[in-house]
Image (spheres, grey):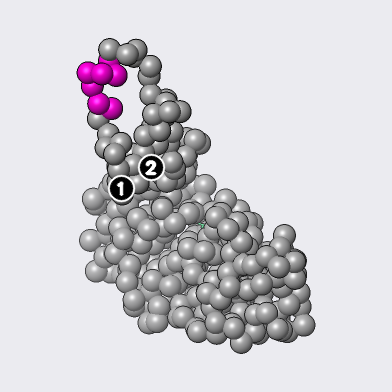
Amino acid sequence: MSFIEYGDTIKDGDTAIVFLGHESMFPVKVQHGTVTQTKYGVIRHSTDLIGKKYGSKVTCSKGGWVFILHPTPELWTMNLPHRTQILYSTDISIITMMLELKPGSIVCESGTGSGSLSHALIRTVAPTGHLYTVEFHQQRAEKAREEFREHGVEHLVTVTNQDVCKNGFGVSNIADAVFLDIPSPWEAIGHAKSALKAEGGRICSFSPCIEQVQRTCLVMEEHGFTEINTLEILLRVYNVRTISLQIPDLGKAAEDNSSTGFDSSNPSSQGSPCTDLQRGTVQFKSGMPLREMVGHTGYLTFATKS
Ligand SMILES: C[S@@+](CC[C@H](N)C(=O)[O-])C[C@H]1O[C@@H](n2cnc3c(N)ncnc32)[C@H](O)[C@@H]1O
């Protein structure tokens, strides 16, 4: 197993994702002789996991079952242990596209945080690119190194434990792209410029507050960055639900003169609503947005060094 290439079978030492149901999953480190407790009972790694194919349905001791999934950066983002606030796949996807990342790209990042973005960056630049990631919190830097080792991607990433605003990224003139997720990104713009290739490259800075964006844009301009652009991406998720609506009782005259507008003679036909005149309801499938409001994650400011 590695986060950058698919492996067919579950092996000792792998990080696998135990999928219990919609929005209910967790990562597990596969180890001979170890057991994992779930609400459906115990999973025994030696007999239930090792040697089985990824995607298998595994029966737990109480008779319930789970699926064991191959890890991906997206699943890791949904399940990783949080050491900091993290970036989610909606922002990550636009960052990847707008920084023009591809296999072979050299990327600088700070801070590493919980490594959510790092895993996605590494997967995109593999097998020939490299990520230089800078984190000034020592334990976070060490934990990130340990996870990259466990996930089989350590050869694609260098973690440096230093202050990016004071000491930069530890490399110069080699990066195709730079990404910043720190409280004072404007203090690192000069270092980002020196890390980027002499012929140019792309930069992105993620900030929750508009005042941080204003300062960052001004400093980007002072350093000669062009095409400065700030945007926000909002994800709207829909659940597919059967909706049941009451048919209004308009009296006898209205019933005689009009139809419901729906094909009640064939209530089960696909796509048409199902009327239940006796109970006075009409049922149909619809996409329903979730109840919670879509929240602000942060502003993404992109610019070009040319
Ligand atoms: C919000 S977290 C980054 C989360 C990361 N993007 C992810 O997806 O997991 C910000 C991190 O930047 C680190 N940091 C803040 N200022 C820094 C600086 N000047 N130099 C290096 N790291 C810094 C913090 O310790 C923290 O771990």
The amino acid marked with disc number 2 is: Lys
Distance from Cα at disc 1 to Cα at disc 2: 12 Å
Residue at left offset 46%, top offset 77%: 4
Q: Residues within 10 Å of mark 2 (few under 14, many from 20)?
A: some
State whether residue 9 is above or below residue 60.
below
- Residue 65 at x, y percent in the picture: 64, 67
- Residue 227 at x, y percent in the picture: 23, 50
Residue at left offset 46%, top offset 80%: 6
State whether residue 13 is above or below residue 217.
below
- Residue 248 at x, y percent in the picture: 38, 19
Q: Along the polypeptide, which appears first: circle 1 or circle 2?
A: 1
Ligand 1's image quarter is: bottom right
Q: Secondary structure at mark 1?
A: loop
**Which of the labelled discs sits on residue 285, or is there none?**
2
Residue at left offset 36%, top offset 34%: 275
Q: Residues within 10 Å of mark 1 (few under 14, many from 20)?
A: few
* Front residue (pair 223, 126): 126
Q: Secondary structure at mark 2?
A: strand
Q: Toward which corner of the image does residue 274 lie, by quadrant?
A: top left
**Which region is colored magenta?**
254-260
The amino acid marked with disc number 1 is: Ser
Q: Residue furthest bottom?
A: 51
**Which of the labelled discs sits on residue 269, or is there none?**
1
* Front residue (pair 158, 261): 261
* Front residue (pair 202, 33): 33
* Front residue (pair 142, 66): 66
The answer to whether mark 2 is within 8 Å of ligand 1 is: no
Residue 281 in the magenta stretch? The answer is no
Q: Is residue 110 left or right of residue 79?
A: left
